[in-house]
Amino acid sequence: MALSSVELCPKPSISFGQVSIPKTSKLKSQSQSRRSASIFAAPAVNKAIKSAKTSSILAHFWREIQGFNNWENLVEPLHFLLRQEIIRYGEFVAACYKAFDLDAKSERYLSCKYGKKSMFREIGMENSGYEITKYIYATADVTIPIHNSTSCGRWIGYVAVSSDESVRRLGRRDIVIAFRGAVTHLEWAANLMSSLTPARLDPHNPRPEVKVESGFMSLYTTNENNKFGLRSCREQLFSEIWRLLNKYKGEEMSITLAGHSMGSSLALLLAYDVAESGLNSIIDNHSEIPVTVFSYAGPRVGNAGFKQRCQQLGVKVLRIVNSNDPITKLPGFFFNENFRVLGGTTYEFPWSYAHVGVEVVLDFFNMQNPSCVHDLEAHISLLKCPNPVEIQREGVGLLKKAREWLLMLKVLTWLKFVADNMLSSLVPINS
């Protein structure tokens, strides 16, 4: 759910005198428990660091960074290696925006500006250590009243794999799949479809209790019918993941999915799908390839049944969120995993939405540019700042409530603007 339907939020003008990472970070695990012990208290970490003599610490420690132990003792305080990897995967997602063509007069409008071999070089990521192997397109089975609007696939992200040189540094062959947020009218319409629908992605069990937001599901599964002869986003991804797993069979591997806003929803759906289908273990029945999601400013994706099934399958999700971002509180603003009945007991309804995974919570806000609370670049910039300036926080009284309502009012205004555009537009989106 990108807050702008045509372009990224401008590069944040916030100064670090106006932003902060709370001294006491908020952390919500799958069990909503708090973890506050120092990273150096973990024996496995100490062993990994001591054994890293000539090679990268990450090569010894990558499973923990990918969530093998649900990021136990890594979030509070935020470990420097995890911070580094959050930034790195965030930049893979930011690449989707940098390479996305928003020039309506261009032949590549709403697609990638560059070819797979040159994209990283063109946007200044030639030293990423990865090679792009496939571009991914998606559409949604959504009808909107815009003249001549058809179900046409738009470039949504890409698949990349680490080079031989990077494998030595990372400790494994890493498959990265990055997704951007919403841009087109069709994507916005899909985002506004807050109703739940059964996922039905398990080939052997329909699991009616596992439900996801219908718009995200539509983007993920709708078949394409255009000049490129593309299949659904899901089929494109499964085909490429299968190919890469076969190509590098026998190697130590990981599958890392990263996305911003709507893209984080697609990343989580894919992670669930890969784990549910067993794709991450079908190549080698004796080992299960880790599947990890780095979610940036992501909304809720499914219900309590979806959350529970992701936990059972071992899908690891690290959610990087801004505490002032209202998008991360949707859908399910009122009925969600935090809903409490009388007595303070948390209760999850089968039809209520629930976040999945562990949270890394940032805290930044700019009164002059409120939309940047959701901006990916603002998240990355704050994480890159080693010693952000801590300022006096607003109280928990009326001022804080006023700020929250201001943000929500802003979001509702944006949603109305997008809806009005879709209803009143009489020309195709690419005209």
Image: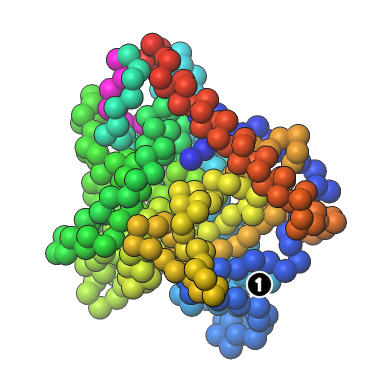
Q: Which quarter of the rendered picture does the C terminus lie within? A: top left
- Look at the picture and state if 148 lies above or below 385: above
Task: Report the side of 209 relative to 216 (left or right).
Answer: left
- Residue 291 image offset from top left, x and y in percent: 38, 64
**Camera-side residue: 251 or 261?**
261
Q: Secondary structure at mark 1?
A: loop
Q: Left or right? Give the position of 130 relative to 266.
A: right
Determine whether 325 is above or below 253 in the image: above
Q: Which residue is mark 1?
A: 76
Crowding at mark 1 (Cα within 10 Å: few <14, some 14-19, many 20+): many
Residue 266 percent location from the top left of the image: 38, 48
Q: Is residue 352 above or below residue 126?
A: below
Q: How is the image coloured?
A: rainbow
Question: Which of the two residues, 126 or 371, is positioned nearer the viewer here?
Answer: 371
Q: Which residue appears farthest toward the bottom when viewing the image? A: 43
Q: Residue at x 37, y 15 (%)?
A: 428
Is 155 in the magenta?
A: yes
Residue 174 visible? The answer is: no
Q: Between 17 and 352, which is closer to the camera in this rendering?
A: 352
| Residue 39 in magenta stretch | no
Residue placed furthest toward the front: 342
Q: Position of residue 239 (x, y in %)?
A: 24, 49
Q: Is residue 403 left or right of residue 353?
A: right
Residue at 36% in and 69% down? 308
Residue 181 appears anywhere in the view: yes
- The residue depicted at 63 percent of the width and 60 percent of the height is 361
Image location of residue 136, percent across then percent down = 34, 40
Q: How many discs appear?
A: 1
**Residue 154: quadrant of the picture:** top left
Going by the numbered disc 1, the residue's amino acid type is Glu
Residue drawn at x 34%, y 62% is: 350
Which portion, as a residue range, is magenta?
Answer: 148-158
